[in-house]
Image (cartoon, helix red, strand yellow):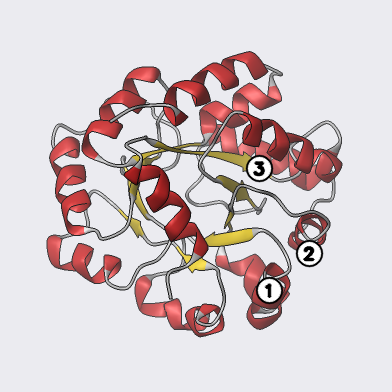
């Protein structure tokens, strides 16, 4: 069965448009979790393809400084995974939601209960960056008969055979990590990045989105030429925190209306 997230993103791709998924940190809002749907509604209005919602955690190994600070601000407000899920259960959204969480909070919550509770929300995708492919069986069986896709991450160091293994039977989209390291770009991209993304896109039967460090109009244009779109985290998180909504609207408009 094709899952909703896969079909939704594929439909946008088939229209010749670039995919654009912004990342937000749940609870990083002046109203705390009370402002979550306010942010989601704003992003929906801008025409995003989906929305990635980060779960704050005390040891975020894949997060750069901007997102790490956002997680700390959220945690100081007492935001927890259970509180976030309860909030998400209160209202359905038109745009698919994708939860990005480390495995420890899920384990503490209870994997089966976590999936069952997510089924009562608009969450259609799940990203767990610290869960190796070989250990996905701790969560994948619970997702099998749901409409929630487990999104694989493919890094620059992932070999060709490994890439094929990761994308086999994958649903939702392929998260192509554009840098070796944490989120947010501190230097130049590798020279072989475009070639890597082109090859991955040619192999994958589902959309490939490029993330980590995407922060400019030039980045969006570049990655739409070699993949199906982008995921933007640090830039969106910082701009939301600084109240720069017009900057966000302009950036999303460029990405979500990008014509291939």
Q: Quadrant of the N terminus?
A: bottom left
- Alpha-carbon span between mark 3 and mark 1: 19 Å
Callout 1 environment at 10 Å: few (<14), some (14 to 19), or many (20+)? some
Query: Which residue occupies 58% across, 20% down?
Result: 249
Secondary element at image label 1: helix
* Residue 50 place in picture, x, y as percent: 54, 45
Q: Earlier in the sequence, mark 3 or mark 1?
A: 3
Q: Could you say which disc has been placed on residue 25 in the image?
A: 3
Q: In this figure, what is the number of numbered marks?
A: 3
Q: Position of residue 95 (x, y in %)?
A: 61, 47
Marks 2/3: CA–CA distance: 15 Å
| Residue identifier under label 1 | 114
- Label 3: which secondary element: strand
Give the left or right position of residue 212, taking residue 69 as reference: left
Quick check: 187 left or right of 160?
right
State the separation of the CA atoms marked 1 and 2: 9 Å
Residue 55 can be seen in this image: yes
**Which residue occupies 50% across, 42% down?**
49
On the picture, is 32 further left or further right than 96? right
Check the picture and name the quadrant holding the C terminus: top left
Q: Residue at x 40, y 20 (%)?
A: 216
The residue that disc 2 covers is 82
Mark number displayed over residue 260:
none
Identify the residue at horizontal 20%, vertical 34% (top origin).
Answer: 190
Secondary element under disc 2, as helix, strand or loop, is helix
Q: Position of residue 244 (x, y in %)?
A: 66, 16
The x and y percentages for residue 23 are: 56, 40
Q: Can you tell which quarter of the image residue 225 is in? A: top left
In the image, 255 versus 190, the foreground residue is: 255
């Amino acid at each position: 069965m094709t899952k909703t997230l896969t079909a939704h993103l594929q439909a946008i791709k088939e229209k010749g448009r670039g995919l654009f998924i912004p990342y937000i940190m749940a609870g990083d809002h002046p109203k705390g979790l009370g402002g979550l749907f306010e942010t989601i509604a704003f992003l929906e209005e801008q025409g995003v393809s989906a929305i990635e919602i980060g779960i704050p955690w005390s040891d975020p190994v894949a997060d750069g400084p901007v997102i790490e600070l956002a997680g700390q601000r959220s945690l100081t407000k007492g935001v927890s995974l259970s509180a976030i899920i309860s909030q998400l259960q209160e209202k359905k959204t038109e745009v698919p939601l994708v939860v990005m969480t480390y495995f420890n909070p899920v384990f503490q919550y209870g994997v089966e209960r976590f999936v069952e509770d997510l089924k009562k929300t608009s969450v259609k995708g799940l990203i767990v960056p610290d869960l190796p492919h070989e250990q996905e069986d701790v969560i994948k069986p619970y997702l099998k008969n749901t409409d929630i896709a487990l999104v694989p991450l493919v890094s620059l160091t992932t070999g060709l055979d490994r890439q094929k293994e990761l994308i086999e039977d994958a649903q939702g989209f392929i998260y192509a990590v554009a840098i070796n390291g944490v989120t947010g770009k501190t230097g130049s991209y590798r020279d072989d990045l475009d070639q890597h993304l082109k090859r991955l896109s040619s192999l994958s039967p589902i959309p490939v989105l490029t993330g980590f460090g995407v922060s400019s109009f030039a980045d969006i244009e570049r990655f739409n030429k070699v993949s199906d779109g982008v995921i933007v985290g640090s830039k969106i998180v910082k701009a939301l925190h600084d109240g720069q909504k017009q900057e966000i609207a302009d950036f999303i408009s460029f990405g979500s209306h990008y014509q291939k």
